[in-house]
Image (cartoon, rainbow, N blue to C red):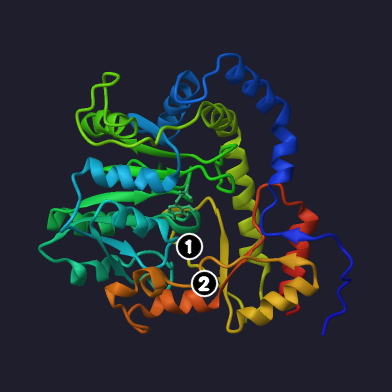
Amino acid sequence: MTVLQKNISKIQCLDLNRQHESIKSEIFTAFEEVYDQTAFSGGSFVENFEKDFAGFCRTRFAVGVNNGTSALHLALLALGIGPGDEVIVPANTFIATAWAVTYAGATPVFVDCREDTWQIDAEKINEKITTKTKAVIGVHLYGQPFDVAAVSQTCESNGLYLIEDAAQAHGALYKKQAVGGFGEMGCFSFYPGKNLGAYGEGGGITTNNEEYYTHLLSLRNHGCVVRYYHDEVGYNMRMGGLEGASLRIKLKYLPSWNNRRREIAKLYQEQINNPKIKMQFQPSWADSVYHLFVICTEDRMDLQRYLNEHNIHPGFHYPVSCHLQKAYSTLNYQQGDMPHAEYLASHCISLPMYAEMTEEEVSRVIEVLNLY
Ligand SMILES: Cc1ncc(COP(=O)(O)O)c(C=O)c1O
């Protein structure tokens, strides 16, 4: 159906190689220092990153851990959430948001997203609150902040904790303020493909509360403050030195990488004019860092086939809404319970999005989509 030339090189959803090529000498120099000091677990490379990351998020403290799921898990434990408690989470998120609640022994209670922003719907939280509800985890999904004021207000008026899942939103701004400092704690993932990704797995928790901070330091390190004296059941969820060292280097570049993602998103938003493509609404108070650029279309498998034919390889985030995942079948949710999240799950497709995309590649994606 199109006259577009097909023999151009592959455009992937994400290509980490290019970023690696641009920083590898700096990374390898830092790795040599980690090896020379045999600082493989915790230590100064992690501590220096923690200080820098807290500064970046404008919070008093940051705690490095082994991945983003652990960050959420430990945040819940630090709040004393456990068996018998309920935690409200959006149905439209990566499953790890809900896993953390399950790992803490509590029950995730799913709430639908808004039809326009695709983020947690603050108005629907109220109807999910019971005497067992202890917290809400809001997710800054795809890199776009959720409506923090609306969700915070619901939390405050019902005596609930707010945790931010900022796993996809390092550097995103809500009303010009960095995410990660609005709730009791902000939880980040440094999975390699994230806007700020480690050379390895990683996660982090930001907070302004010193009590949580000291508790988190103990929880991530076998429940001890003094070595071999275990005051509570703890975990081995420490961050590694190689991860800390690589993250500290990459953090310097993050603002420019995020700005490049914003530029690409603007081009997509302004130049994709195919009425078959629906985009996420961007409220004026949300300054997204576009971890993902998700669109919706009626027949996304057909769009995937078409894009693949033109050597463009999209992703799906996420094809099954959390409340309908088999792992949570015992919670007895039904198809139709969360209409907006279910619509997204069956119509979403993610366009290529990473800071190193060339102008030519971005134009190519736009051109191909406009001819669909
Ligand atoms: C929204 C969200 N929450 C939590 C996580 C969990 O992070 P990790 O994969 O580092 O455990 C992710 C990572 O993909 C995520 O996207």
- Compared to residue 271, the image places residue 138 above or below, namely above
The residue positioned 59% from the left and 79% from the top of the image is 297
Q: Nearer the viewer, residue 53 or 280?
A: 53
Q: Secondary structure at mark 1?
A: loop
Residue 3, position as x, y percentages in the image:
88, 79
Where residue 365 is drawn, which disc sits there? none
* Mark 2 lies on residue: 319
Which residue is the extreme one toward the top? 37
Q: Nearer the viewer, residue 250 or 263?
A: 250
Position of residue 179 in the picture relative to residue 103 (left or right): right
* Mark 1 lies on residue: 282
Position of residue 245 in the picture relative to residue 186 (left or right): right
Disc 1: residue Cβ within 8 A of ligand 1's nearest atom = no
The residue positioned 55% from the left and 41% from the top of the image is 196
Q: Nearer the viewer, mark 2 or mark 1?
A: 2
The residue positioned 59% from the left and 48% from the top of the image is 193
**Badges 2 and 1: C-beta atoms under 8 Å apart?**
no
